[in-house]
Image (tube, grey):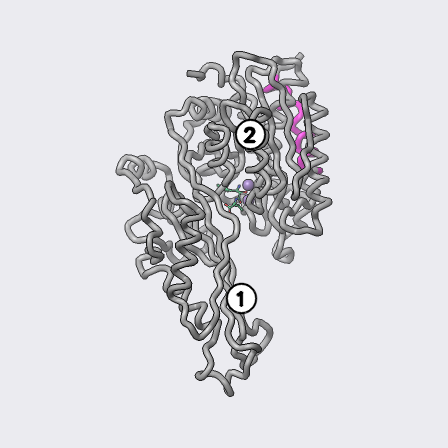
Amino acid sequence: MSNPQSYIDSNIETFKKELFDLLKIPSVSTDSERKGDVRKAADFLVEQLKNIGLDKVTLHETPGHPIITAEKAPHDDRPTVLIYGHYDVQPSDPDELWDTPPFEPTVKNGRVYARGASDDKGQAYTHVKAIESYMKTGTELPVNVKFILEGEEEIGSPNLVPFIKKHKDLLACDMVLISDTAMYGEDQPSITYGLRGLAYMEIHVTGPNRDLHSGVYGGAVENPANVLCEIIAQLKDSDGVIQIDGFYDDVVPLTEEMRGSARKLPFDEEAYKKELNLKAVHGEKGYTTHERASARPTLDVNGLWSGYQGEGAKTVLPAKAGAKVSMRLVPDQHPDKIAELFKKHVESIAPDTVTVEVEAHHGGHPVVIDLDYYGLKAAAKAFGDIYDKEVLFSREGGSIPIVADFKKVLGVNSILMGFGQTKDALHSPNESFSLKDFHRGIKTSARFFEVLPDFVE
Ligand code: BES
Ligand code: MN
Ligand code: MN
């Protein structure tokens, strides 16, 4: 009987076809019309986990989308790895910007194009196939494994935190393994040891009781769109420093040591500009582009609306304006505290000619994982073996809020072993995932379970 690694090599074409079947399911968690599709994706994974022979495969209902758990835990004296992933995806819009339909996976130049290809179906599925490679070859799993797969990551995991609090025994483990991040470059294995947190806000400015003629009333009636722009413009100064009172109070400053090791990462600013068609990079004074995008807090408008958006000109003074604004957070900023500070600040600078309301959406805590953690060393060994290249460690700017909760509730570190690339276009049109990395990802995961026992301290 073959070993796990050769089983993976022999079956990779089947694995790809299965992944494409999963990618065909439009499991958009934020869209209530897709609720049935989100469930279809969950059912697909339940079938898979059962077929590969895992125990206790369970679909747990929640007030939102289901959570799936499963396990194979034969050893009393070996570590237990909890594999986390999400089967929900972001909306595909604007659909007209996709070269091929978002839910018809299409292979081009060694990449599969589809919504969720990289975030996170393709990456999460690597671990399912890695475990299969042990089960189907009759190879004893070197460690205990458990799965937790959710369908609400892209909407802030509202039901996952209560779930892990309630099921601490079911989820008891020594570490969490997650593939839902990007590598530092092509063919460059890398482990993410920090993620930013998030505070997501919405501002509503309301003025007169209806849209007005901007000639008849303009100049005498406050314009909500103007007010909103003034408020937003005051949130940062010209050095990119956020002006909210108390915003930086809990930020752990970057040490010279951290800055030094980050500077050793092969960051090519010219290539970065070129890829995004930027005239220049931009950000907080005194920090590098990589630091700005990973280890410093930010504030960005994510959506903005008011007034006439149609063809030509309409002379109107809009009655309402609104914006969605998010802040990425770093240790030890607290999302609830930052949301409160934001609300207070915006209310304090709002003129009394209009009504300004500020509301908080979901948030998440930032995390940084200790580089001495043995799980990271084992992951680096496995990653390096399969990619045949030295592994880099970096902090990333995105957020996976549940990582902080795994630490708080289950007391364990997460290993962020991402197989994506920045060019995967997560959340954008034409999302894709390298099929070579899908293959190497499965092999890396299988190798990780093999080497982990050697690293246990
Ligand atoms: N997988 C991403 C997060 C990510 C991507 C981290 C790339 C590091 C590198 C995840 O699915 C995601 O999109 N998270 C959201 C947060 C959530 C609360 C909606 C994000 O970062 O905006
Ligand atoms: Mn993701
Ligand atoms: Mn995402």
Q: Quadrant of the N terminus?
A: top right
Which region shows up in magenta?
4-21
Question: Does the image show residue 193?
Answer: yes
Residue sitting at x 47%, y 81%: 221
Q: Quadrant of the C terminus?
A: top left
Q: Do the residues under discs 2 and 1 have CB atoms within 8 angstroms?
A: no
Is 61 left, or right, of 111 in this rendering?
right
> At label 2, which amino acid type do we have?
Gly
> At label 1, which amino acid type do we have?
Trp
- Which residue in the structure is indicated by mark 2? 441
Identify the mark nearer the N-term, 2 or 1: 1
Nearer the observer, 411 or 182: 411
Nearer the observer, 234 or 5: 234
Q: Secondary structure at mark 1?
A: strand
Residue sitting at x 51%, y 65%: 204
- Compared with 429, 310 (above or below) is below
- Compared with 393, 74 (above or below) is above
**Tag 1: Cα neighbours inside 10 Å, few (<14), some, or many (≥20)?**
some
Q: Secondary structure at mark 2?
A: helix
- Compared with 69, 241 (above or below) is below
User: Residue 69 placed where, x, y %?
Assistant: 64, 29
User: Residue 132 placed where, x, y %?
Assistant: 65, 22
User: Residue 329 placed where, x, y %?
Assistant: 41, 46
Residue sitting at x 34%, y 38%: 262
Main SS category, magenta section: helix
Nearer the observer, 274 or 303: 303
Question: Within the magenta stretch, is there residue 6?
Answer: yes
Quarter-wise, where is residue 188 in the image? Answer: top left
- Which residue in the structure is indicated by mark 1? 305
**Tag 2: Cα neighbours inside 10 Å, few (<14), some, or many (≥20)?**
many
Quarter-wise, where is residue 259 in the image? Answer: top left
